[in-house]
Image (spheres, rainbow, N blue to C red):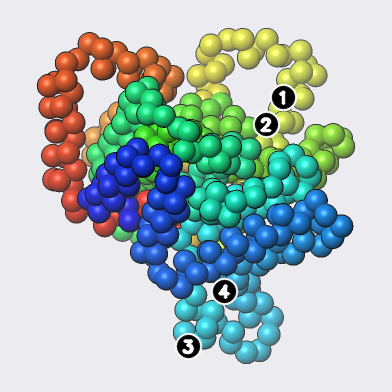
Amino acid sequence: MLFHSFEFMIFFAVTLCLYYAFPGKRIYLLALANLFFYSIAGIGYLALFIGITSITYFCSLKLQGKFKKLYFLFALILNISNLVFFKYSLFIFTNIERFVPFNLTSAEGVLSQIILPIGISFYTFQIIAYIVDVYQGKLEPCRNWLDFWVFTSLFAKLVAGPIMRGKDLLPQIETIKEITFKKEYFKLGIAYFMLGLIKKIILADQIAPYVEQFYAKGAAMTGADSWLATYLFGFQLYFDFSAYSDMAVGVGYLLGLKLAINFKTPYLSGSGTEFWRRWHITLSNWIRDYVYIPLGGSRKGKNRQLANILLAMFISGLWHGASWSFILWGVYHGVLQVLHKIYLDLRKKFNLDWLAEKRIYHFVSIFVFFNLASLGWVLFGRTDIKSALVIISKMLYFNPLSLVQNGLLPYVIVVLVLYGLHIIEYFIFKHLAQISLMWHKYFPAPIRGLAYTLLIVVLVMSLGTAENNFIYFQF
């Protein structure tokens, strides 16, 4: 059920009305709403999800007892195995097949028929974080199964995040019947949801055909085509994923719940390190806290730190998909971060830190990294590594004059406009609360109603895009 579909609008409107009409029954209402929401993906996967959640819940209650390590390892291995089986088994056996004389992945085989359960990558990482936090004594175990079910399955963030932590979401769920209607939260909820809707329907889904138009050229793509296709894909991916995240935050606010912000205008980053503080923030924080820091972080010397960064980004790439292209994309970003760390050390060594104080330095850094990140999107968007490398080679050896010669300047203008919108978005989110208050303070209800009506009309006119899933649903 897509956030930008009428089915979801009706589902959520009914849920929201009942939610505020019967505050004492909210936990039961959300539990049922989550069941219904996920059941659309298939009853079998719903049973699997409930089973994984229930076993994890039981094990978490035993993480303070005599056999806590045994229960911890069992719960951890169970959740990792569940993810590996559904997401990586075909990839693993396909690569093993290269070294054995028989076919493990024929079309008739079981592995090739595996369908990835919706949201499995997101809810698995959320559950693992919960288990680890309880085991390490950072979090008290949830002692109500319904609370834990709502925590793991909350429909607002189930399919594509944000990846919530127990310390942030569980206290809100455990006191959910005490939540009162907050006008400020409701206004923010509408604002976030509408912004997400605009990003998805008016931006991401409209960019997609142009991306496919360029890539449809295949081997005939020029260097200029490759750059434009990659820029457009980068914006399509960003507007698509951040749209879902914004809408999820909006749904959370409308329910009186505060979900984590997942994006902070990442294309204004001046380095790989900064990029991952702005892009898919909850995943980045998860990788930092449960992979990078346990490996030693920066505490065990420079060489170990750089190795930890590469391993952490390898896992980030693997999380995104079971293919070598995603893995290479993750490692590529790891290399960018490693090179940036080395650069910072050299800059300090030669007393050049004063450069960072210059405004032009920041502009150049943003320009350089935006293009480096764009090169990486080729690996992310193309599953065939060979074709991705061909595209990258064309990008590295292209003639800028071909943009004029081949009549591609209109696409250049589109890219510049999209980047301009990205900059505007930075200021919108920086002052969203104030903008929301001003919107309701200075614009009378009839004008606001007209604006909302126009947005609904846009939604109706864009019904065809309801078939366009959010890109990150596949992860």
User: Residue at image x 52%, y 86%?
Assistant: 109
Could you say whether the residue bearing mark 1 is in a helix, strand or loop? Answer: helix
The mark found on residue 108 in the picture is 3
- Taking the image as shown, residue 131 lies to the left or right of residue 9, namely right
Residue located beneath label 4 in the image: 90
Q: Amino acid at mark 1?
A: Leu
Dot placed on the residue nearer the N-terminal end, 4 or 2: 4
Give the CA distance from mark 1 to mark 3. 53 Å
Give the CA distance from mark 1 to mark 2. 6 Å
User: Residue at image x 71%, y 14%?
Assistant: 352
User: Residue at image x 45%, y 32%?
Assistant: 179
- Taking the image as shown, residue 79 lies to the left or right of residue 117, namely right
Give the CA distance from mark 3 to mark 2. 47 Å
Dot placed on the residue nearer the N-terminal end, 4 or 1: 4
- Taking the image as shown, residue 273 lies to the left or right of residue 119, namely right
Q: Amino acid at mark 3?
A: Glu
Could you say whether the residue bearing mark 2 is in a helix, strand or loop? Answer: helix
Residue located beneath label 1 in the image: 344
Give neighbour class at mark 4: few <14, some 14-19, many 20+ (Cα, 10 Å).
Answer: many
Give neighbour class at mark 3: few <14, some 14-19, many 20+ (Cα, 10 Å).
Answer: few
Residue located beneath label 2 in the image: 340
Give the CA distance from mark 3 to mark 4. 13 Å
Give the CA distance from mark 4 to mark 2. 35 Å
